[in-house]
Amino acid sequence: MAKKDIDWSSLGFAYQKTDKRFVSNYKDGKWDEGVLTEDSNIVISECAGVLQYAQTVFEGLKAYTTVDGHIVAFRPDLNGERLENSARRLEIPVYPKEKFIDAVVKTIEANADYVPPYGTGATLYVRPFIFGSSAVIGVKPAEEYQFRVFTTPVGPYFKGGAKPITIRVCDYDRAAPHGTGHIKVGLNYAMSLYQIVDAHNQGFDENMYLDAATRTYVEETGGANFLFVTKDGTVVTPKSDSILPSITRRSLMYVAEKYLGLKVEHRPVAFEEVKDFAECGLCGTAAVISPVGKIVDHGKEICFPSGMEEMGEVTKKLYETLTGIQMGKIEAPEGWIKVIK
């Protein structure tokens, strides 16, 4: 099979329909075996649980072409575990991790011609999700659900290199204590849309959310975890029950300690500490690390020593090491790379 006739270098981070997607339905208390289908449309009741009460959870991961020509996925088992946890929190029937991995592999295999070639900077984004499909008018869980996996080729998050961004401290809260901030649900992202549009309108790239209880500790942005580097080279990531457990963040912390020999700390980070850090980044699936050059707190600027021109020294090493692992240039820890073909 030949690769699709796509200008890989011009791809942006946007949806493009591919040939097949995986679909499984939950009915009468069990999930069916699921099928691959060419139909990208979903037909549901106007009263479906997902439409009335936002009963939906999702994941995001990527497939890559490695330097030796294999197609691989990065740590899909952790995405499966996180989807299980998200589903439990919204009273959605769990789609088991083992079946999740199998569905992801089948979907990537079926769309292998859309996996961008090595060296283009592009990847195949994979989006698994579950939603309540049956009619619900009272406030309660749906009785029927659908699990789907689709793929779309996407370009590098940063075209021309990762330039540091400017973010602001947001007056709104992302997640409540004991709420849903620790799981990957659509409603969390819907709540952040007003703030991100407003941030862009005000000339900022992203929002920094503080803890809702005291507004004194750093949490995350609308879609990524924070990563800081101290002036002595320690890598620090904020810890909170309201922060989504980013797979990229966890991987970077391992890389920092085991590959780069750096000290790492995963702990509550007071906002008052931020001005004393040497580097700052946002970590997630899409960009791996987005460097932050400046944080604006209601007119007061916090400018990091790493500057506004390029990634800080430690951040760059972390980025290059993790992407090297993903692309097969650096040996991966056991179990991190799932070879598709």
Image (tube, rainbow, N blue to C red):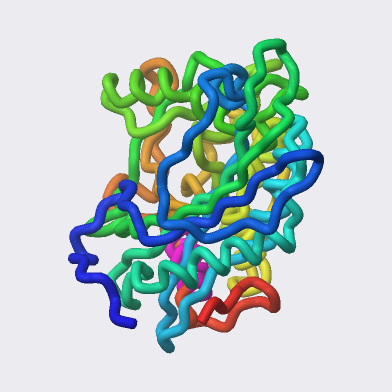
Q: Nearer the viewer, residue 147 or 158?
A: 147
Q: Viewer-proximal residue, 59 or 290?
A: 59
Where does the magenta region start and end? 314-326
Which image quadrant: the N terminus?
Answer: bottom left
- For this orientation, the residue located farthest to the right is 29
User: What residue is at 41 percent from the left and 16 percent from the top?
Assistant: 298
Q: Position of residue 168 (x, y in %)?
A: 41, 26
- The answer to which of 67 and 312 lies nearer the viewer is 67
Q: Main secondary structure of the magenta part?
A: helix
Q: Against 226, is 194 above or below?
A: above
Position of residue 332 relative to residue 232, above or below, is: below
Horizontal arrangement in the rendering, residue 19 relative to residue 95 (left or right): left
Query: In this rendering, would 11 be left or right of 303?
Result: left
Q: Is residue 229 visible?
A: no
- Reply above or below: 71 against 110: below
**Residue positioned most to the top:** 138
- Residue at the image position 32 percent from the left and 67 percent from the top: 121
Q: Position of residue 19 (x, y in %)?
A: 37, 61
Q: Is residue 251 above or below residue 190?
A: below
Q: Is residue 46 magenta?
A: no
